Amino acid sequence: MSKNTYQMNRRTMLKAAGISLALPWMESLAGPRTKSPPRRFCSIYFPYGVSLPKQDGEYGQWNWFPKGSGRDFTFNKSLEVLEPFRDQVTVLGGLSHPKVRRIGGHDSGDTFLTGEELSLGATGLRNSISLDQFMAHTHRLGARTRFSSLVLSSDGGVGMPTRANTLSYSHNGQPIPSFNRPAIVFERLFGLKGDSVEAQRKGLTRTGSHLDLLLEEAKSLHRKLGKVDQGKLDQYLTSVREIEQDVERSAQWLNVPRPKVNAEGLSLDADNETPGKLIHTMLDLIALAFQTDSTRFVTYQLASMHGAISIANKFPTLLGFKKDAHGLAHGAGKGAGAENRGKWDRYQAECLAYLMKRLSEFEEGDGSVLDNTCIFYGSSNSKTHNNTNYPLILAGGKNMGYQHGQYLRFDNDVPLSNLFVTIQQQMGVKAESFADSTGQLDGLIV
């Protein structure tokens, strides 16, 4: 096969795979079947719950949940920063994952997007696939962009079971490593500093060859192992095959120019000693990733459940709050501690408002990128150690059929996974279930 023929076939394959959508979505470039902007999903998580003093008590104004219900509600101080986006948010109360209610309070972060009780198997604690990965891969909604998903956190990597540094899990329940350095995320998305395309291609070819050898050696080793060790090896090889798929995907995209963006104003050197800049820069990168259609699925863990070991545990102290994140959570039920924790809740809500504002500034179709993006924000605790009544917000997605401007409360018998069914359906796919769901979540859809 000649070089020119190879390049022609490569371009044809990329076009057939829909990779021309790497550019920001533009109606004039969309085909007759793609006149609508793409739909997107973002989940932002924070640990240790929220401030929940009695609504009629001295510190009731710092209760995270609003006063009232339905459309007749008033934000308390913790969420009042969302008032400008009132018609773009729905506050959800009473929901949780039933399987997770009985496990340790600090163990629940791993299950936020999976709804699965961590179970002990031959290869260790087992989780299941997270909602973002289920939509991106099982439904193949992530197949048309350069990156099927973007996994972010303040701590980076995967952490450890029950104290993970990621919200995203693969189809076999393995944690997907997260990125926590803005410069690396920017380089990954927009590649303004990397090697030449030819050098990258050679590197991917070498990686692919090494993986082939590894898989071949594993076949021989597999026959010599006992059942338990075979299971462990199979789990490991599944991860290797997923890397192999990522390599193949990267190779397919090499000939497609990355989007050009203006890096002015981005604090790409921000780190864990400058948490304000770090968090806002990560939010800026999420907005740019969506605006350029580099991906349609993002998860961002503001902090893990890893207590004092978590990099992000010191963020409140560095930002001028009275204690670290873990300390604020444990002091939330003691007098003025409710106010101290409430002020940190408000800071985190300000971060959500910042992302919504950024997405609303990007025009798209008849609205904005925010109108085509569903944001799922919240925690897997109500108070620290309590795995019921998660504090949750669904935001954005006006053009996806969500009716916002509400505070909806649900009974204990309604699983959070019902919301995950609704989210899938509003992303445009047929979905009847997820985890332990019993149907859709009522009251959200026009």
Image (tube, grey):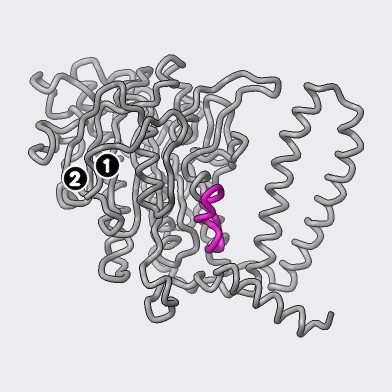
Q: At 73% from the left edge and 44% from the top edge, which residue is drawn? A: 240
128 sits left or right of 442 in the view? right
Determine which of the numbered discs, if any, sits on residue 81 in the image. Answer: 2
Residue count near mark 2 (Cα–Cα under 10 Å), binned few <14, some 14–19, many ≥20: some
Q: What residue type is labelled 1?
A: Ala
Q: What residue type is labelled 2?
A: Val
The span picked out in magenta is 136-150
Locate the N terminus and report the quarter of the image it occupies.
bottom right
Mark 1, secondary structure of its residue: helix
Locate residue 231, reporting x and y percent: 75, 27
- On whether residue 381 falls in the magenta region, the answer is no
Between 158 and 135, the one nearer to me in the picture: 135
* Residue to which mark 1 is pinned: 349
- On whether residue 148 falls in the magenta region, the answer is yes
Task: Relative to 325, say whether 402 is above or below.
Answer: below
Q: At 71% from the left edge and 40% from the top edge, which residue is drawn? A: 238
106 sits left or right of 177 in the view? left
Q: Can residue 358 be seen in this view?
A: no
Q: Please identify the quarter of the rendering in which residue 188 is found.
A: bottom right
Rounded to the nearest whole Å, what is the CA distance between mark 1 and mark 2?
A: 7 Å
Q: Please identify the quarter of the rendering in which residue 13 is found.
A: bottom right
Q: Is the magenta stretch mostly helix, strand or loop?
A: loop
Pointers 1 and 2 in contact (CB under 8 A)? yes
Between 33 and 76, the one nearer to me in the picture: 33
Locate residue 179, reporting x and y percent: 54, 47
Residue count near mark 1 (Cα–Cα under 10 Å), binned few <14, some 14–19, many ≥20: some
Locate residue 426, reporting x and y percent: 35, 51
User: Which of marks 2 and 1 precedes in the sequence?
Assistant: 2
